[in-house]
Image (spheres, rainbow, N blue to C red):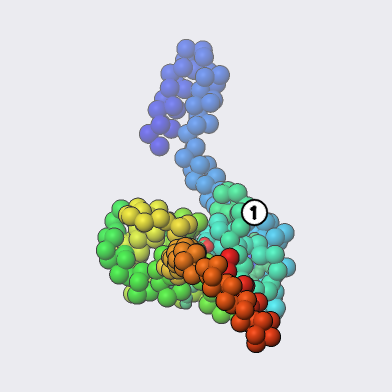
Amino acid sequence: MTAGRLTVGHRLALSAAALPLLVAAPALAAGPRPHQTQQQQQSGGDDLVTRGQELYQVGCVSCHGVDGRGVEERGPTLEEAGPASADFYLSSGRMPAASGAGQPGRKEPVYDADQRAALVAYVSTLGQGPPIPDIDPARGDLALGQQLYTANCAACHNSAGSGGALGQAIYAPALYPATELQVGEAVRVGPGSMPGFNEQQLNQQQLDSVVLFVTHLQDPVDRGGLPLGRVGPVPEGLVAWLVGLGLIVVAIRWIGTRDAVSLTPEPAEAAEAAEATETTGDPSVGGDEQGSSP
Ligand code: HEC
Ligand code: HEC
């Protein structure tokens, strides 16, 4: 407003100096600008939703239906998805799914960040769901995170975060590729067979702590021993067994060889054995003894 009055004042002064609208017109046009910008921002938000809707009509509607109401045997309703779920499923490449059956896996995302923002904006208009969480592992506590992880996550994702099978064609994936935000989103959303955890179950500080612990699992400091691809305690035991058994076999062979040498029949004994074969007429006796000599 002040700017508007000033420009009007300027114009009056300048028109007297015979430099009328040439200079003043652009300044006057700038007067109502703040209002225009507001309108543009408004329609910018609408544009995002509109763009998201366009992408949805092409890539999602066949499985999630008109207005996200779901399609039987193809895709669930998105009326309870919300921003965190949409962002998680799109950024981890789970959506668009290849088929309506089975657990969608992590893939390279199909949509870039702008397209995902548009789709998230559109899906958010379809219903209610948890917002994208604000994650900052620096606010977390590692020991608390480990406790919470052990109590709430390790049963499915394993103490090392390497995941595991949960049942027929259902698996808890390894947590290594997930970003900090995706870990936070997964915890709030509970994708697929995973339970979701709301603010009452895990508050902000607890969530930050769990995320901090997961990043720790993703990038552990190897203290002693070999990492063995960090596949967890069972294969480590197996490796120990195989190496141990290998050593035992080598030792046995070594002892066996020495014994065989010392037990090799002396020529005199061999002659006796040959005699025995002749007298009993049983070829298997001599044959056996010859077989055991190297
Ligand atoms: C071929 C079918 C198919 C296509 C195409 C598809 N989806 Fe899905 N979508 C599914 C299925 C099946 C699930 C359930 C997956 C699960 O159980 O984890 C799902 C789950 C979701 C969820 C989680 C729902 C919830 O309640 O939290 C979101 C969000 C989602 N899809 C968004 C999208 C978006 C956005 C697109 C388009 C870019 C898309 N999907 C394309 C089949 C599909
Ligand atoms: C009952 C078993 C179960 C529990 C408990 C569980 N999860 Fe999951 N989690 C799953 C399953 C199953 C999926 C895969 C869901 C899908 O893709 O449909 C998953 C997916 C994830 C993902 C996504 C990984 C990726 O590939 O992008 C993260 C991150 C995750 N869980 C973290 C956690 C954390 C942290 C906890 C504890 C607070 C937890 N989960 C508890 C079963 C579980």
Q: What element carries label 1?
A: loop
What's the residue at 44%, 27% (across, down)? 7
Q: Quadrant of the N terminus?
A: top left
CB at mark 1 closer than 8 A to ligand 1?
yes
6 vs 197, nearest the viewer: 197
For image coordinates 65% across by 62% down, the residue present is: 96
Q: Look at the picture and state if 125 lies above or below 276.
A: above
Image x and y of residue 76, in percent: 62, 75
- Relative side of 150 to 269, left or right: left
Say which of 255 and 33 sits in front. Answer: 255
Q: Which quadrant would residue 61 be assigned to in this image?
A: bottom right
Above or below, 131 relative to 4: below
In the depicted view, which residue is nearer to us: 50 or 176? 176
> Residue farthest to the bottom?
280
Taking the spot 29% from the left edge, 60% from the top edge, the residue there is: 142
One can see residue 127 in this view: no
Q: Name the residue under label 1.
A: 110
The amino acid sitting under disc 1 is Val
Question: Which residue does the image show at 49% across and 26% down from the upper left?
Answer: 27
